[in-house]
Amino acid sequence: MLHEVLYILFGIVFLYCALSVLYIFILSFAGLFFYQRKTFTGGLPVNAKRIAVLVPAYKEDGIILSTAKNLLDLEYPADRFRVFIIADSFKPETLAALRELPVEVLEVSFDKSTKTKALNEAFRRIQAPYDIALICDADNMLAGDFLLRINDRFVAGARAIQGRRVAKNLDSSFAILDACSEAINNHIFRKGAQALGLSSAVIGSGMAFEYENVKEILASIQAVGGFDKILQLRIVAQGIKIEYLEDALVFDEKVDSPEAFQQQRKRWVSSQFIYLRQFFGPACAKLFKGNFSYFNLAVANNLVLPRAFLLVLPPLLAVLGFVLGGGLGWAALGLWGLYLLSLGMGMPAALINRDLMIAILRLPRAIIVMIGALFQVKKSNKTFIHTVHTKTEISNTLFKEKNKS
């Protein structure tokens, strides 16, 4: 009896893992062999589109000035873009310093702060007309040609774009692991999806949309966390494909402690489970109407097991499989090998170095932290989770030629 129960348990978990790995492998393979880079005309555009750079910031006194200065220094006609700092709970001296810069400071205050509320308030106050809304986080710095590349694609007909988010810092083992995770995510869920003709998934920052369209969509969103998950579905529901622009770099601060790592993952896992349940029905209906991108973003992206779990479950299944016999253990090890190959295809060669080998020693702790985040999923969706940022410059030398701060 026990033997039969173990067989059933093995079969269920193995099937779930196998489907997750197969999905990841297909996207990773497509991203490596079928992705086509977008051409870039280069140079300053004659008729540049008007861009509003929106930066919702909550208690980011330590880094906001460096962020604002970076954005002001971008290679784009100065009269065709404007930086809006949406300042929530800032110190008076920070606000005073910001007002000395040629940026628009929009002070906001809420009983319960969220990025969605901040963005909606900004849209309500901005009166000037814009063609593109670029949403960035307070810790983001952009490569000097970022706006030029965004404008180039919108002129070519794009209506929604996700830039490539890369590490701002690689100064700790957790930051390196976080950077690797982001790079693999970019390759699989953005580059791979686009290679298959699907919409890229967005990341929450470094994303550009038609101004009036995103303004209207956000007005109907009240999410505490994971607002970008809903936003991307509303965009894709309109028949718009979100384009991934690999050469448009967004430098994002990577966490340097297990506590920050868990806070971040808690927010991500929470939105994954909640939005899977919320949009499963509509996604199935969209699938029957031929909107594969909607189904992929609403169901497939959220149904696949978190990557940290897939590092652990197949080896555990292998142990159980060798006990049960019949080649099940080898099947589990083969599945694990396919998964590692999928991750390897998405790992940038530049990140594979001695520091990564040292960081891998911290991987078990990172996996434990990720599993711990599961037990706090419900709480994280009801509370705004703020990650403290401290990096005021780009220290990632892997993109030295793109660094402009």
Image: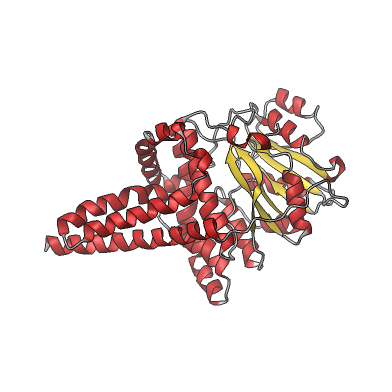
User: Does residue 234 show up?
Assistant: yes
- Count of numbered badges drawn on the protein: 0
The quarter of the image holding the N terminus is: bottom left
Residue 71 position (above or below residue 324): above
Residue 362 position (above or below residue 53): above
- Quadrant assignment, res 19: bottom left
Q: Position of residue 155 (x, y in %)?
A: 79, 58
Q: Residue at x 77, y 40 (%)?
A: 83
User: Does residue 112 show up?
Assistant: no
Residue occupying the far bottom of the picture: 288
The quarter of the image holding the C terminus is: top right
Q: Position of residue 248 (x, y in %)?
A: 67, 47
Viewer-side residue, 313 vs 116: 313
Q: Position of residue 281 (x, y in %)?
A: 49, 69
- Quadrant assignment, res 212: bottom right
Horizontal placement of 193 versus 99: left or right?
A: left
- Quadrant assignment, res 391: top right
Horizontal placement of 63 versus 178: left or right?
A: right
Residue 374 position (above or below residue 25): above
Q: Position of residue 207 (x, y in %)?
A: 66, 50
Q: Residue at x 48, y 44 (%)?
A: 181
Residue occupying the far top of the picture: 93
Viewer-side residue, 280 vs 161: 161
